[in-house]
Image (cartoon, rainbow, N blue to C red):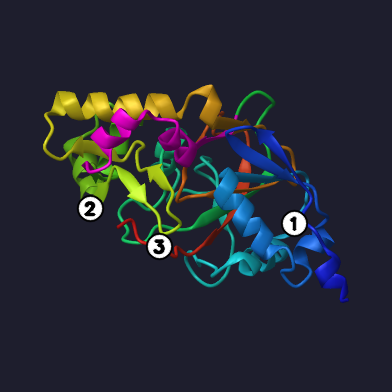
Amino acid sequence: MSVATEIRLNAEDIKPGIGSRVLNTKEELLRGGALAGEIRELLEARGVLVFPKIDFSDAEQIAFTKTLGTFAAEGEGEAVTKITLDVKENPAAAEYLKGSLYWHIDGTRNDVPILASLLSCRVPSPKGTGNTGFSNTYSAYEALSDEQKAAYDDLRVIHGPWATLFYHDPEPSIAKLKGYQAIGEKELPLVWAHRSGRKSLVIGNTAHTVIGKTPMESAEILVGLRDWATTEAFTYSHEWSVGDLVIWDNTGTMHRAEAYDPTCGRMMHRTKLEGEEPFE
């Protein structure tokens, strides 16, 4: 029997409705992708996986990402992306990233959203700030009543990044609004019926209009479901330490950065996995 086949995933649940902590060593995680299948299964089942103080270098994070699926490059080549609100480090994206402080799903303008994001902590914010919150939208849907599921299953929603602007800039200039609107928008199902047979909610701060509903009815549905999905039973807030790595299933969770001082130096490095399943 080879050494690789002897490796077993060592994980423990964080909360009943969301999250697991993976305790394998860096060497085990990088050894030829021996644990990749089990990690993928656990990610879909739990929504969020935490690898405490695994201390991946950028090259190791890229290599680990590739064991799990197709690496989704951002910008030029296979580099990690720096995630920070510090305008000195990330001048182009710092304004747009303000929307990340509110619950969202990545890629709601795309036919096929990314499968997962992997975020590692290089510099944490001061203790008590800058956590990353996660909401399991599989679990939130599954806990709805049969009557609620029947009411929501066939609804469709318009998503647009411009809707996120009003969360952090309630009175934007028309030029800024048009700039955000130029990014585009997309019609998506409120309930995503996955190939696995499970269903998840497609909600968050890009969702603004339920087709066939009045603005008041749309707001009640979307805010109500977000409020439900972000209750204690379905959420986990990760307090970062240097070297932590967290993976979340972008097809079945929402996430948000929790408030921190943009000048504190908080720095995360992100890699992503290309999507494998369209919204519909």
Segment colored magenta: 130-156
Q: Residues within 10 Å of mark 1 (few under 14, many from 20)?
A: some
Most extreme residue toward the bottom, as rendered?
1
User: Is residue 109 magenta-colored?
Assistant: no
Tell which of 253 and 147 is nearer to you: 147
Query: Is 40 displayed left or right of 106 in the figure?
Result: right
Alpha-carbon distance for marks 3 and 2? 21 Å
Q: Quadrant of the C terminus?
A: bottom left
Report the amino acid beneath label 1.
Phe
Q: Residue visible at 17% across and 37% down?
A: 174
Q: Which residue is mark 1?
A: 56
User: Callout 2, which amino acid?
Assistant: Gly
136 sits to left or right of 236: left
Q: Which of disc 2 and disc 3 is earlier in sequence? A: 2
Q: In terms of secondary structure, where does tag 1 sit?
A: loop
Q: CA distance from mark 1 to mark 3?
A: 28 Å
Q: Is label 2 in a helix, a strand or a loop?
A: loop
Let me know if residue 255 appears in the view.
Answer: no
Q: Residues within 10 Å of mark 3 (few under 14, many from 20)?
A: some
Task: State which mark lies toward you, 1 or 3.
Answer: 3
Q: Quadrant of residue 164?
A: top left
Tell me, for residue 277, which label it has, or none: 3
Image marks 1 and 3: residues in contact by CB distance under 8 Å: no
Question: Residue 182 appears at what percent x and percent y?
Answer: 21, 52
**Compared to 187, does 69 lie above or below?**
below
| Residue type at numbered disc 3 | Glu
Q: For the residue labelled by badge 3, is the local secondary structure a helix, a strand or a loop?
A: loop
Residue shown at the point (54%, 53%) measured from the top left: 117
| Coordinates of residue 205 in the picture (x, y in percent) | 34, 36
Residue picked out by circle 2: 184
Left or right of 237? Residue 190 is left
Image coords of residue 86 (percent x, y) = 53, 40
